[in-house]
Image (spheres, helix red, strand yellow):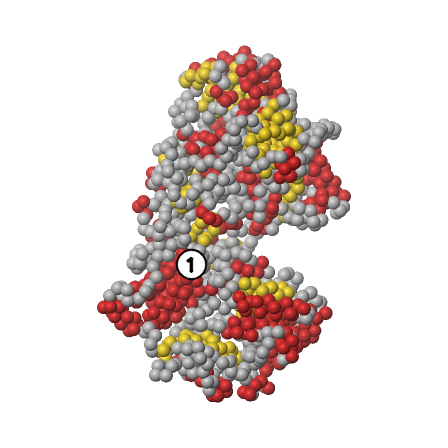
Amino acid sequence: MALRDSADSHQVAPKARSGRFREVPTAGEQLETRVLLRHIDEPGLHRIEIYEQLGGYTALKRAFRDCEPGELVSEFEASGLRGRGGAGFSMGKKASFLPHGDMDKYLCCNADESEPGAFKDRELMFKNPHQLVEGVAIGAMAAGATRAFIFIRGEYAEVADRLDAAVAEAYEAGYLGAGVLGTKIDADIVVHRGAGAYICGEETALLDSLEGKRGNPRLKPPFPAIQGLYGGPTLINNVETLSNLPNIVNRGPDWFKSFGTEQSTGTKVVSVSGCVQRPGNYEIELGIPARDIIFGLAGGPLPGRTIKAWYPGGSSAPVLGPEELDLPYSFESLAEAGSMLGSGSIIVADDTISIPEMALRTARFYRHESCGKCSPCREGTNWTVKMLERVVRGEATPMDLDIIASVQENIIGNCLCVLGDSMAMPVGAMVRRWRGEFEETIARAREAGPAALDVEPAVMTPAGVGA
Amino acid sequence: MSGDSKPITIVVDGVEIEAAEGAMLVDAAKHGDVEIPVFCYEPKLGDPVGACRMCLVEIEGIPKLQTACSTPVRDGMVVYTQNDRVKEAQNAIVEFLLVNHPLDCPVCDKGGECPLQDIALGWGAGKSRVTDPKRHFQKPIPLSPLIRIDRERCIMCYRCVRFSQEVSEDEQLQLLDRGDRSYVGTHEDRPYIGPFHGNIIELCPVGALTSQSYRFRARPWDIEDAGSVCTLCPSQCNVKFTVRDEKVVRVLARDNEQVDDGWLCDKGRFGYQMLSSPDRPLTPQVGGGGSLEPASWEEALETAARGLAPAIGRTAAIVGGGASNEEGWLIQRLVRGVLGSRDVASTARRGLGRAARTRLASPELAVATADIDDAGAILVLGCDPMNEMPIVELRIRKAVRRSGAKLLVATERPTALDGGAAIGSAGCIGAQRYAPGEALDFIEGLRAAIASGDADDDAAGFADALRDDGPVVIVWGEGILAGADREQVAEALLGLADVLGLDGRDGAGLYEIPAATNGRGLREVGCAEESGPGYAATEPGRSADEIRAALEAGDLDAVILADVDPIRDFDDPEGWKRALSAAKFTLDISLLPGESGRAANVHLPAESHAEKEGTLTHPDGRLQRVRPSVPRPGAVRPLWQALSELSGLLGADPGAGTAGEVFDLIAAEVPFYAGITVDDIGGMGLRWQDRHGLEPAGELEAAEPPPAPATDGKLRLGTYTELWADHVAEDNPALRFLAVGQTLELGPDDAERLGLEHGQRVEVSADGRSLTATVGLRERMLAGTAFLARGTATDPAGVLAGATSIDVAPAPGPEPEPAVESSDADGEAEKRPEPAAPSLVVTKREPVSW
């Protein structure tokens, strides 16, 4: 409970879009509950001595010296910690699926943070890399894995450098390597940089990529917990999930459960971006109203503007409207509202934003990032983009809107992984909810004539092959 | 799926179906006559990938639709494949697949036999809502000289890429780029060349990959399929000939899991153009001294009878490996029974005596081809499957990849399998070289190491890997028996089998790769120096080499050559030329006569493997039927009939009215074929070991091996079989680009020592004979060894027959063009301009060594 005093909190000073710093309203501070971000702006936190001074690596010592793997897994399960990467599956339960036995097991930390709107892991890793390293080591030990990989997206080069340095320091200090802290348990961490593909954040594609193959999702089952990296049982968790482990080990599952709601325990770092006054990462207790995050912490829309739509959990979450702003920000309430908390990335669109263009932009992202392995995603994303381009060019008819909606229905649930759904859910939600605006856009663009929008060519041909 | 899984019941669309537990739903449903459409699913390629999503079905208790291709059935599973929800999904997937697929069916070569057409019609909504432009590519462009790729038609089912990566393991095909920009291609647009790459044409469910030699030759309604067996190598793959207007225009695989696993090599797939070659004689010919004139069958057979009749006791026959059991048996009967001679050979070198041969052929020691799949360890001994029996190479790769079999390679010459070989426990590499002709030492050493259990040297590490819990299969090549120490090698091999406990163990044993297609069958029906039909005791006759010498010396007067060109294929071509000109009478029976055939007195036109009727015996003992698929062209007649008639003219008609009756005569004489009829053999074949045992004949005689030849510091010479070094590559326009010249293979160190460079022309000489070759450097060679290919069109290794060490000197004369050549696989004479891009550089490539 000690952490809950607001004096201990520290507001991350967000940059306004103009580049000037804004005053931080005091009201915002009380809305934040800083656990993961507690020392985030401590100078030199990325260095091991500062991290240790602030109590770092005590959890690792306890875990490796005094705990049995099964005991730790039970603690994680009891804490109710749910995956922070998007799916929200119970972390402890996932760890408990790993078979016992002598086979090579692995832990993979998914640091391929590529979802539009998400930038929480970047800050967690860049400013407090040791918290993650400690969490990964504990998680690996609990899973019975002696080898862990942190798969970080290639674009996070500086962050990866920091992680490399932190891992090296941890080896130096004996927290990693053969026989951690003189115990008989080994823990190795390899920081692996991805080559820049959103799909590699999908857990099985991440494994393929890590194995040196083309990053394509695998068929599930078998699930990675049974047959993952190099065919061995593999636990895959997000950066934020694993960063929570040291605190759970130190303070116990009951302490963790004292935050949040019954089904969404703990705190969550929320990345807020889009049309707000103070975009940035805010750590909140799960279950507080979304309005508090968007207005209280991020300052709400610019003066004179109103919120038109918001993605509650990254670009793959079905879009909500202003009516849903008072929903508690938790896994269960957002799911009930037909959307999802996802990775906890709120993107806000105000009344100046065109929903069809937002839909097109979203669809283009997923079309560009689709791996192409399964038909509904590969063709569905591409077809949707072409139809939405016709919408904004004024070359579509209302019937096309029906087709767009129906195509999204045909994608959802029929794909190999969730990438296709990730486009179909928000786009489908937008077409349903703002159909009138889509129709108006078509009519307006038709009147404005050609070249109303600069649209990239519909047909992309591979270099050297295309005619 | 394995046979021991217990039967369960599932309910598909309200109908109860019995299924094997663990079978994939899509397969199980077939037993209830329910077809679930698929594109990417192909069990031959390994585990399902669930990429195309065509097979989505509803399973009670699972909220999302599931892919039937990847869902193993469980007892009591209730499945819907035709309800509204599933239909909607199926319609959706078809619509998605057609978003970018051009509807150019009327001009597409696949039209009419296209799974996408069938599924779109059967499971699609009937119309598409797509009005946007589709993607475009330059098309169709060569993916290789044999395959054209039309990327617009590709539906990204991954089959071809998976074949390249997980079956042939050449890893040349890749899916490039991402998402809807994905396309199948090779690194830097290089041509895809590999000995198995033709299979991707057949795997393609759309018209994206088409055969250069078949495209636009026929429509599905113009053609008929006829099942037979390919006789171009010992693999004896089951094939389907596509026949149009009485001509073979395509060869497809006819899946037989027990033989070929559904794959074909490119030789079998594209080697059909020679059947309608303009060079093929279609009538008998009579003449001599190098000139032959067409004749009637009566005239030809009478001439032959007149030529052979005086040579009683002085006639020899050599039966080549492509001959059927019937042809082989009739010829040996003619020679032994009618002409009173004992000289019948079918191999270049003398074969084993009966004692060793019957022991090696023991059913207790035999494995079926499919047993390789489940082997715990595989020892490849003295053979290169890719060149000698290509489909077995795929089998071995499959066993290693999918079942984790340990692979060990012990050969004279590097193989493509080397890299996949296991690492022995003593740290030794699982691929070992022994010097040419020294298989005996290697086998003895290995046997001793296994027997002693010591684990302190290389052989022991190798041995340790063979002491596997799972069954051990030794895949060995007949080539190790080519030396004078063949009896000792056979005994050592039997000793190795003994110490490994292979005798009688299920799935463990010896698997021989014979030197020729029907090598085993010919041997079993009596085409061998040492034994008659069924390994019956007989007075030993002359071997091929001895026949040559006897002809030259005048000790033999006549010779019958069936499907063999000794001048090209056997040792000492000059000697054979002298022998054939010394012979008083030569009867040649061949499809495309070579130099030997052209020197004959009578030439009888042979049937091709698409025309003949008869049986073959697979290297694993499986009797297979070659069935007439196209009518015999011109005046070509069944050879069994002509041979019977010839026997009749000489006074002893065998009395068979059909090819099947000839087989009955064989079965009456070969004890282990007894009671087997052609109907029993059927379309899938029958292993005689499943019906009969084989008693060993006689006692093995202990003999001292001949002394090892002195090499006096020179390069030691080995010879090898090269897949494309025979007439098939030359007689099929599509394959001409693969024909090889003679290459002297050397290790880089030896080349440096001798001052030789890769690609340099050299003169290779020994004992006063010489040939010209191009230097080819190869890794993983044993130091001090060099290799030459047998059977090349020019400078075959046989020129240096018997030589064990060689001298190498730069060849005189100007440097010729590099060996790289390109060819128009269409077989059309005129040269077309090369496509602008990508440039086509044709090089031969082997599957990667892991």
Whether residue B583 is situated above or below residue B772 in the rendered picture: above
Q: Is residue B413 left or right of residue B53?
A: right
How many C-alpha atoms fall within 10 Å of the one at disc 1: few (<14), some, or many (≥20)?
many
Instruction: Identify the residue under disc 1.
Output: B179
Residue at 44%, 32% in the rendered image: B732
Quadrant of res B628 = top left
Quadrant of res B699 = top right
Q: B338 and B322: which one is in front?
A: B322
Q: Say whether residue B569 is visible.
A: no
Image position, residue A86 (x, y; %): 48, 71
Quadrant of res B620 = top right
Q: What residue type is labelled 1?
A: Gly
Disc 1 is placed on an element classified as helix
Residue, far top: B310
Residue at 39%, 74% in the rendered image: A319
Residue at 43%, 33% in the rendered image: B733
Image position, residue B220 (x, y; %): 35, 41
Whether residue A345 is situated above or below residue A464 in the rendered picture: below
Q: Say whether residue A174 is visible.
A: yes
Q: Is residue A289 left or right of residue A454?
A: right
Image position, residue B785 (x, y; %): 65, 35
Image position, residue B329 (x, y; %): 54, 25
Tell me the chain of label 1: B
Whether residue B590 is situated above or below residue B737 in the rendered picture: above
Q: B415 and B823: which one is in front?
A: B823
Q: How many marks?
A: 1
Residue at 49%, 12% in the rendered image: B306
Residue, far left: A447
